[in-house]
Amino acid sequence: MAQPAESTFPQRPTGGTTRVPRPARPVRPGPPAGPRVTVSVAGDSRAWGDWIADRLERHGLRAPLHHWDPPAAMELRSALGGLTLSGGRILLVFSAGYFQPGVRTGREWDTALAAVTAAHPGRFTAVSVTDPGNLPAGAAALGPAQLTEAGALHAERLLLRRLGLPDTPAPGPGGPRFPLDAPAVWGGVPRRNPRFTGRAALLALIHRRLERSVRGAAVCTLLGMAGVGKTQLAAEYVHRFATEYDVVWWVNAGDGDRARRKMAALAPELGLRTRPEERLRAVVDALRRGEPHRRWLLVLDGADDPAAVADLLPSGSGHVLITSRNSSWDTYNTLLLPVPVFDRPESVAFVRRRAPRLTAEDAGRLAAALEDLPLLLDQTAGWLNDSDMSVTRYLRLLEGGIGNARTVVADDFPMTFAAAWTALLDRIAETAPDAAELLRLCAVLAPGTVPVDLLARVRGDFTPVTGDHRRLQDALRLLARYSVVEAAENAAGTEVESVHLHRMVRLLVREGIPATERERYAGAVRGALAAADPGSPDEPAHWPAYAALLPHLLPSGALDADPAETAGPVLHCLRYAYLTGAQDTGLALARRAEHGWRRLLAEDHPRRLDLLHEHTNLLRATGQYAACEALDRPALERLLGRRGTPDAEILRAAAGLAADLRGLARLQEALELSRYVLDGSRQTFGEHDPRTLAAQNNLAVSLRLLGAHDQARELDERTLLARRQVLGPGHPWTLYSELHHATDLRLTGRIDQALAVQERNVRGHQRVLGADHPQSLRAGHGLALCRRGAGQGERARQGMEALLDRSVRLLGRRDPLTLMIAAGFGCLERESGDPERAVAVAERTYAAYRDLLGAAHPYTVGSDANHALALLATGDRDAALGSLARAVPAMEVAVGPGHPWTLDLAHNARSADADLPPYQFRDFEPLTI
C-alpha cells in the first residue's frame, strides 16, 4: 500500500490534563463491587477502552471491556443484543472502526440501534472518539459524549455525566495515559490510515509476542512480500498501542546510512548531550539502559537488508518492530511473524471502504481476481471508484491480459498482479495521457525514487508536460491518487518533490512501451540527466545531486549511448563515487561504461582516457594496485609514444602510474615518476594550478613513504598554504593537505604542534564532509596517533577503536583504510588495553594485508612484526622472536636495508632478544599511499 505521510501525534485542545505513567492498567486487589458498565470498544480505540474502564473503576463501578468485532455474517441487531447478556449498562465507544465500514451500512446501523435500544430502554449509552461526521444517524440519536474535544479532566467529566454520575474526576496517580496525550518522544511515525481494515488478530498477536518476550529480546519482524501491507500494519500497531510507550521512533530502514542518521536524530529527543558522531552509539546505549525512558518502541520499516541495519537493534526493556521481505532476520534473534494477504472478508471490507460504489459481491469477485493482495486491492479499487467501468468489464480485461506477453514480469510474480496493472495502465493511457507519459519516463529510470526536478528537465516531445510546472504536478498527483506512485511532498504540502515507483510496476510499464518508442523515452531521460549534472563533482555541495543521478545511468541506457551525449554525467558520477568512498558502486559503473564505450570509441580517445582515470582511481582505493598498473602503464606508454611532450593527459596518466607504484611498494620508481609529473605540471599548468598542487602533494607522499619526512614536511607546508589561497581553507583537498602536514609534524617529532593541527583538522573534516566520510576517518586516525605520541594512550585507544568500528561498517573489514586503522588500533590495544585482544587484532590485520597485497609487501611484513610485538606482550616470547626474525629480512627485501621500516624492525628484533621493556619498541605504521 502507499506509504502514509509522517504524522505528529493526534492533537487535542490544551488545558486540564494530567500525564500519567505506566502501568497501562492500575494494579488493584480486585474489581469494584459496584454497578456494572460493559465498555464495548473496537480494536482501533483500544486505548480509549482502557482509559474509560480505569476512570469508571476509580468511581466504584465494575467496567469489563468487550472487544467489538462481530463476524460480517452475523446480523447487527443480534450482535448488539448479545451485549445485554452480561447485565448492567452498556457503554458503546463509537470510533471509525466500531461501525465496520465496508461491512455494515449506515442504514443497517440505524435499524439495529433503534431496535435494540427500544427493546432494552435505559441500558445503552454512548461516547464518541471519532469525527461526528462518521456517525450514522442512529448512533447520533443516542447523543454520545464527544471525548476528543478537550483534555483528560474534561473528557472524564463528560463520561461521568453521560452515565448520570457525579462529574468530579477521581484523584490519584497511575492508570493508563489519556489517549490524546502524546508519548514523551514521537518521531517519524506515518499518519494513521483512516481506511485501515481488519488485521485484528495479527495486531493482537504482535502485541502479545512483544509483551511476552524475554527482556532484551522483544524484537518482532513482520515478514511478507511487497504490497502485503507490512508498513500499514506497523503504523496501525504504533497508533493503536501508543499509550503503552514513552518513546515511539520510526526509522525508514531501506537505506542503511539514512537509517543511521534517523536513529542518531533520536539523541537530542532523549536529552543526550553528545557529539554528532557519537549520537548513534549514545542512542542505542540509552535505549538499552532504559534511560531516560524505559518503555520505548522502535520501528525499522523496509529493512530488507538485515546486515545493513542489524547493529541498530538495541536490547533493553523496550520493543522493536521490523518490516521486511527478507526471512534471514530469523538469524538475528528476532521473532518472525509472516504477514499473509487479506482473508476474504477483510478484502471485501477494504475494497468497499476504498470504493463504496461496489457491492459486496463485486468486491468479493475483485478480491478473488487479485488474490487478496492489499497493494493491488488499494490501487485497483481506488481507480474503479473514480471510474464508471463495471467490475465485470474490468475482470474481462484482466482475463484478456493474462495471455499478453508484456504482463509476464517474473516467474515468481503473481500473474494477476501483472494483468491488473495492464488494465489500469491502459485505462490511464486512454484517459490521462500526461500521466501516462510521465509514468513511461519514470519507467526508463531506476526503480524507486525519482526526483520531480529531474522529470522537469526532460525536453523534446515531452516539453508541453514536463516544462509546464502546474501540468506536471497535476499529472503526478493523478498517478499518486491511483496509488500508481507514492508521492513525497514538500514541507508545506503544496508540491510533489519526488515520486516512488514500485519495482514490479516499473517493469510492467517499461515492457509496455513499444520497441519503436523506447529510445524516444530513453533519449529524453538521458538529456535530462545531462542537464541535471552540476558539472563539478569535487564540490561536496554537489554530492547529493550526483547521488540522485547515479542510479539512473544504467537503466536510461547512458552507458551504451553516444559518449558525446552522456560522458559528462557518467564520468562525474564515477568521480563522485570515488570521492565519497562508494567504491563498489563506482567500480560496477566503470566496468559497465568501459564495456559500452569500447564499442564506440578508440582506445586513446579522450573520453576513454577519462574513463580509465576514474576507473583506476576506484581500483586503487580498494587496494588493487597491480590491476591499476596493468591498465595505467600501457596507456602511458602509448601516449608517450605518440606525443612525446608532456601534456595534460600524459601527466595525469603518469600520476596514476606513480600512485600504482606507491601501492606496489616500488617506492623509488614512484618517487622519480612523481618528480616528473610535478616538473611537467609546473611547466604546463603553472605553480598554483590545482593539478600542480595535486602533483606536489603526491611527491610529498612518495617522499614520506621513503622515510624522507623533513622533505615531505617542507613540501606539504607549501602545498597547504597554496591550497588555502587557491581552493579555500574549507575545501576537502585543503583539509587533506592539513592532515598530511600534521602527519609530517608528528613523524618529525613535533608532537604538540601536530596534535593542535590535527584536532583542528578533524573538526574541519567533520564540518565539511561529515564524520562518516573516508577522509574524515583518515583524519580521526591521524588524531589518535597524535594523542598516542602526546602520552594520551587510553584516549587514543578508545578513539581508534571507535574509528575501526565505523570503518568496518562503512567500508568493510578488508578495505585499505580499515586495515590502516586496524593496524593502529592493534598497537594501541597492546599498550593500553588487552594484550590478548591485541594479538587477535594484529593477526587479523596481518592476514588481511597478506590476502590483499601479498606476503612480500612491506605492509604485510610490517603487520607481521606488529603481531610479533603483541605476542611478546602476552609472554609468547619464542613465537614473537620467530616472527621478528622472519620479518626483518623480508622488509629489507621489500624496501631496502636503509629504509626506516627495515631499521625499526631490526631494532625491535634486537630489543626483544635482549628482553628490553615495551616502550623501547617501534611500531610499524602503514601510511597513506
Image (tube, grey):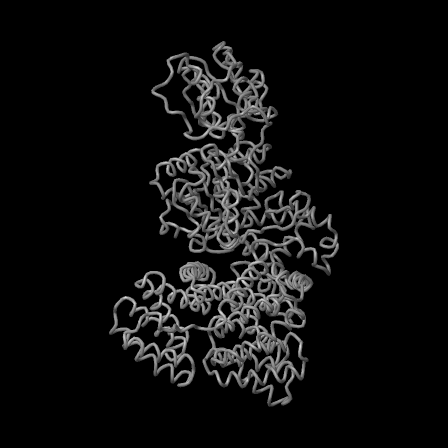
Q: Is residue 152 above or below residue 186?
A: above
Quarter of the image for residue 442 reads bottom right
Q: Is residue 346 above or below residue 487?
A: above
Q: Residue at x 61, y 47 (%)?
A: 488
Q: Is residue 223 left or right of residue 146?
A: left
Q: Is residue 190 visible?
A: yes
Q: Is residue 516 visible?
A: no
Q: In terms of depth relative to the viewer, which is nearer, 207 or 258?
A: 258
Find the residue positioned furthest to the top: 121
> Total of numbered circles in the picture?
0
Q: Is residue 640 above or below residue 815?
A: below
Q: Position of residue 479 (x, y in %)?
A: 63, 46
Q: Is residue 647 left or right of residue 26?
A: right
Q: Position of residue 509 (x, y in %)?
A: 59, 54
Q: In terms of depth relative to the viewer, which is nearer, 817 or 548?
A: 817
Q: Residue at x 41, y 61 (%)?
A: 797
Q: In terms of depth relative to the viewer, which is nearer, 237 or 842?
A: 842
Q: Position of residue 694 (x, y in %)?
A: 60, 75
Quarter of the image for residue 890 reads bottom left
Quarter of the image for residue 453 reads bottom right
Q: Position of residue 248 (x, y in %)?
A: 49, 39
